[in-house]
Amino acid sequence: MDHDTKLLISVVIGILVLASIAGAVLARTVKSEAAQKTVANLNARTRSWWVMSGVFCATLLLGPVFTTVLFAFISFLAMREFITLNKTERADHEVLFWAFFVILPLHYFLVGIRWYGLFTIFIPVYAFAFIPFRRVLTGETKGFLAGTARIQWALLVCVYAVSHMPMLLALPLKGYEGQNAKLLFFFVLTVQLSDVMQYVWGKTCGRRHIAPHVSPSKTVEGTVGGIATTVAISTCLWWATPFAPWQAALMALLICSAGFFGGLVMSAIKRDLGAKDWGASIAGHGGFMDRIDSLCFAAPLFFHLCAFYFGTGMNPAPPAWILHWLGK
Amino acid sequence: MIASRAIAAATRLFTGVRRVPVAPHGDGPAIYFANHTSHLDFLVIWSALPLPTRLQTSPAAAEDYWTASSMRRWLAARVFRAVLIPREGITRENNPLDRLAACLESGRSILIFPEGTRRGDGQVGVFKSGLYHLARRFPQLPLVPIYLDNLGRILPKGALVPVPIIAQAHFREPIHFSETETKPAFLERARAALLSH
């Protein structure tokens, strides 16, 4: 573990310690029942944050294989929530089996072996075509487009987008070889910190709602305050990234904005399906999808901007052993 | 016991069903009844029960299916301790209710599906009279309704493979047999209790 990584982990531990102390103080001071409920939820969230940060840091330190497996599990659990709330039909059943047990593992296998060329098109091209092909075999035409589109969305959002995070570890960056774990850390920290800061600002001085029908908890004050604070903190972490401070600030602003809209979009889908939370797996937060909704849309954007401005070019060719195996 | 724990844990992991901390009627034997949408139904309820209750509960299962191989026979007899019910050739002498009653008389709990067959549309059908006859023979036992949500989407009728959709087993308030009630009224009350929130 290099010095920068230790420092990044210390930052996270510092924030969590602060949050835990603040939560304990609040729990003793607030009186009204509504406020106590809010504080209890806050403390449940903080406890979950300790666990999630611990798991994330540990897998990141264990290396790219563990990180890839962790994100594969996150994709699986998120897609499971997405499909559970979407009332899929009987005709979707076999397609869903392929999506969960063939397409998802294969896609993460491509992440694992770093076959970038196939990784970028596997879901948008092959899975995109396979899903309607398989479903048309069932002979059921009712709800055909809606059914296939749901599953295609599920794969794009929960698998394709999320997998750009472990793929970030394989992105060759100028003068940053072997340090990509810190870039992934920077990205995840920025998006999640932005969520937390928007929550804190929204709870303390949120007045005007941004989109009351889509997400009743999002306010102008919360969003602006949260994003501004996060950009400020993330800019101060530029030393862990391949960016200059101003570049770090722009990147942080971009991923916070994409995270904000991502959260809003997933919230709109959730409400369209008539639910408040995607699940109940993470105490205080809701489901896995509630936790990663803002990461989904930001991850591929961040990946491609890093590759475009700072990358030295991804190799699209398959790994040597595959070429050998194919007899080429 | 180890097999029971392992199978129950794997089932909960795959279906997302949570274990209930205590049986809803407290201790002692009961008649559990649930809506029927999937081959996994009994496995899911059995896995959701707290361990001591689970070891005391015998699910009703189709005899032809669960005696078809030695593996299934072992599971049915040793792990689930199922009451095997013939699906065809039912006569007065070969009444499946007698097997369930014998199980209850030995002090165990049973789990039955009063609709009799799996439904494909997610609705809860009309209850057959088996539940009524059992309740009348054991009026002291609590009848615990369990509403299964989404099981029919995990493994629908006619599907070969399951998908990992999150299911729920909702344990409802127990009901009791009443001497004064007619059979249709009792069965309707039991069905309403299953559907109540």
Image (cartoon, coloured by chain):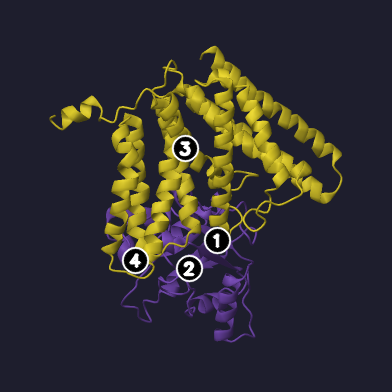
Chain colours: A yellow, B purple
Mark 3 is surrounded, within 10 Å at the Cα level, by few (under 14), some (14 to 19) or many (20 or more) other residues, namely some
Identify the residue under disc 1.
A272
Q: Chain of mark 4?
A: B
Identify the residue under disc 4.
B63
Mark 4 is surrounded, within 10 Å at the Cα level, by few (under 14), some (14 to 19) or many (20 or more) other residues, namely some
Task: Evaluate whether label 2 is on the same chain as label 4.
Answer: yes
What amino acid type is highlighted by mark number 3? Answer: Leu
- Label 2 vs label 4: CA separation? 14 Å
Residue A258 in the image: state x and y as whole percent.
54, 41
A214 sits to left or right of A1: right
- Label 1 vs label 4: CA separation? 44 Å
- Label 2 vs label 3: CA separation? 53 Å
Element carrying mark 1:
helix
Residue B84 in the image: state x and y as whole percent.
38, 65
- Label 1 vs label 3: CA separation? 25 Å
Mark 2 is surrounded, within 10 Å at the Cα level, by few (under 14), some (14 to 19) or many (20 or more) other residues, namely many
Element carrying mark 3:
helix
Identify the residue under disc 2.
B112
Task: Evaluate whether label 1 is on the same chain as label 3.
Answer: yes
Kindly identify the residue that appears in the image at 28 percent across and 63 percent down.
Answer: A136
What amino acid type is highlighted by mark number 4? Answer: Glu
Identify the residue under disc 3.
A301
A79 sits to left or right of A218: left
Element carrying mark 2:
strand
